[in-house]
Image (cartoon, grey):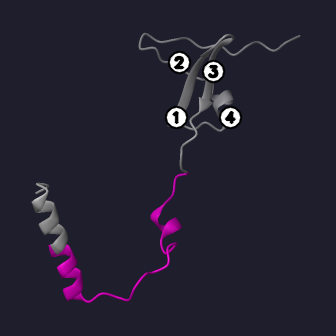
């Protein structure tokens, strides 16, 4: 005998609650982004595959090799001043 199908109701706002057991089985915590597709057999929900995996700064810090030597305070200030002048010239400030 087949198990009873899981059911839910569409709210007046168009929201549907997925049963907790199903969310846990699929590893879909709160905030999981889903793609919704209309198929011949019904509506298909699948997790959105992000273009890039989520990363933290500490995961990538130091991953690029340094180029050139260290800069002096005067060199850093000159670089900032040059960027500010360029942005002013483009009307950014």
What residue did someone put label 2 on?
A: 16
Residue drawn at x 10%, y 54% as measured from the top left = 91
For residue 63, side relative to residue 90 (left or right): right
Question: Foreground: 77 or 46?
Answer: 77
Q: Nearer the viewer, residue 16 or 78?
A: 78
The residues tagged by marks 1 and 3 sit, at their Cα atoms, a distance apart of: 13 Å
Q: Which residue is mark 1?
A: 33
Asked whether 43 or 19 is in front, the reply is: 43
The residue that appears at 61% across and 25% down in the rendered structure is: 45
Give the distance between the C-alpha atoms of the residues marked 4 and 1, in whole angstroms: 13 Å
Q: Say which of marks 3 and 2 sits in front.
A: 3
Spatial distance from mark 3 to mark 4, Cα to Cα? 14 Å
Q: In terms of sequence position, does the residue under pointer 1 or pointer 3 come before the other?
A: 1
Mark 3 or mark 2: name the one nearer the start of the chain: 2
- Per the image, the residue denoted by label 4 is 26
Residue 13 belongs to the span the image colors magenta: no
**Crowdedness of circle 1 by 10 Å Cα count: few (<14), some, many (20+)?**
some
Residue 88 x %, y %? 10, 61
Foreground mark, 3 or 4, reads: 3
Horizontal and vertical percent for residue 44?
63, 21
Q: Is residue 44 left or right of residue 59?
A: right
Horizontal and vertical percent position of residue 65: 50, 78
**Element at badge 4?**
helix
């Amino acid at each position: 005998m087949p198990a009873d199908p899981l059911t839910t109701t569409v709210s007046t706002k168009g929201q549907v609650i997925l049963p907790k057991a199903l969310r846990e089985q699929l590893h879909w915590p709160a905030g999981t982004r889903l793609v919704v597709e209309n198929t011949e057999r019904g509506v298909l929900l699948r997790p959105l595959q992000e273009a890039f995996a989520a990363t933290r700064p500490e995961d990538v810090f130091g991953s690029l090799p340094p180029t050139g030597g260290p800069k002096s305070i005067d060199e850093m200030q000159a670089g900032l001043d040059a960027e500010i002048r360029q942005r002013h010239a483009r009307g950014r400030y």
